[in-house]
Amino acid sequence: YFSTPDEKPLAGVKTLVTAGPTHEALDPVRYIANHSSGKQGYAIAKAMQQLGADVTLVSGPTKLSPPQGVNFISITSAEEMLAACQNAMPSDIAICAAAVADWRVAEPSKQKIKKKNNTEAPTLSFIQNPDILATLSQSGPNRPGLVIGFAAETEHVTENAVSKRERKGCDWILANDVSPATGTFGGDENTLFLIDKNGVNPWHKMTKDAAAKKLSKRIADHLTLNA
Ligand code: CTP
Ligand code: CA
C-alpha cells in the first residue's frame, strides 16, 4: 500500500471549524441553549483532517468525543467561541457549523436568582451575541481564503440562505432545513443545499458523515482549481 499525494489533498491547509451549541448563562446555575448536537461540525472536522488538513475544532458543549488528530478547543458561550476563533487566525479555511445562540442575557446574575417571596417570574433582558461567521468573513487582510457557513432555516430555506450568504459576506453557505419534521437537529441525516456565488446546488438527503466528506472533497477540488 503506497500513499499518493492525492489522498491528502488538504495537507498543510489550516482549517477552523466551529460546532455545537453555545450556552448563555442566566446565573451561575442556569443557561439558555439550543438543540444542536454538534454532529455535523464534528463530522466536518474529521473529514477535513482525514484529507490532511490541520484542523482546529472550536466546540460548545456536546456529548461527542473530539475526532482524533484534531486540535480541540472547548468553549461555553458565544463570546468565548469568538475569542477562540480569533485566536485560531490566521487560517486558510473557516467552516462555521456551530448553532451560536443569537442572544445572551444582558446582565447575568452573579448569584443564583431566587424565588424569594415573589409571585412574579423574573423578566430577562437580552442583547445580541457577536456574529462569528460575519466577523471572520469581514476580517480584512486576515480573512481566511474560504469562509463557509450554515443556514438553519425552517421555511423559505434557499431564499433565506441566499440572502444570508450576502449579508454575512461568506463564500459558501450550506442551507439546512431544520423544521422539526425533518429530524435534522440531533438526527444523523441532513438535506442540504450548497450556495455559492453561482447559485444553489441541491444535495441529496445523506448522513452528516457523508455530507462532511462531500464538503471536504468539494473544498479540496476548489483549492486545486484555484491553485
Ligand atoms: N453564526 C455565527 N455567530 C452567530 C450566529 C450565527 O457564527 N452569532 C453562524 C452559524 O454558525 C452559521 C451561520 O452563522 O454558520 C448562520 O446561522 P443562522 O442561525 O442560520 O443565521 P443567523 O444569522 O443567526 O440568522 P437567524 O438565526 O435569524 O436566521
Ligand atoms: Ca441564528
Image (cartoon, helix red, strand yellow):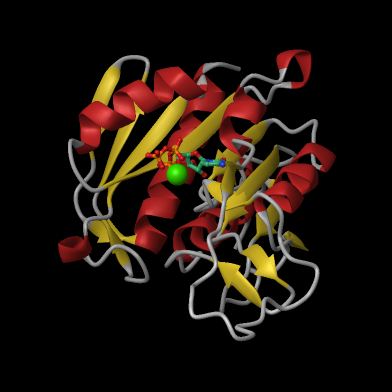
Which residue does the image show at 15% across and 64% down from the upper left? 181
In which quadrant of the rendered image does the N terminus lie? Answer: bottom right
Which percent across, then down, holds residue 51? 59, 49
Decide if residue 105 is on the left or right side of residue 71.
left
Asked whether residue 55 appears in the rendered view, the answer is no
| Residue 46, image quadrant | bottom right
| Residue 110, image quadrant | bottom right
Decide if residue 8 is on the left or right side of residue 195.
right
In which quadrant of the rendered image does the C terminus lie? Answer: top right
Query: Between residues 126 and 14, which one lies in front from this camera angle?
Result: 126
Query: Between residues 137 and 29, which one lies in front from this camera angle?
Result: 29
Which percent across, then down, holds residue 151? 38, 40
Which residue does the image show at 74% across and 33% down from the upper left? 91
Q: State whether residue 140 is above or below residue 123.
A: above
Which percent across, then down, holds residue 135? 65, 28
Q: How many marks?
A: 0
Q: Residue furthest right?
A: 87
Which percent across, then down, holds residue 126? 57, 48
| Residue 10, image quadrant | top right
Q: State whether residue 218 is above or below residue 77.
A: above
Decide if residue 162 is on the left or right side of residue 71.
left
Decide if residue 203 is on the left or right side of residue 100.
left
Asked whether residue 209 appears in the rendered view, the answer is yes
Query: Between residues 64 and 226, which one lies in front from this camera angle?
Result: 64
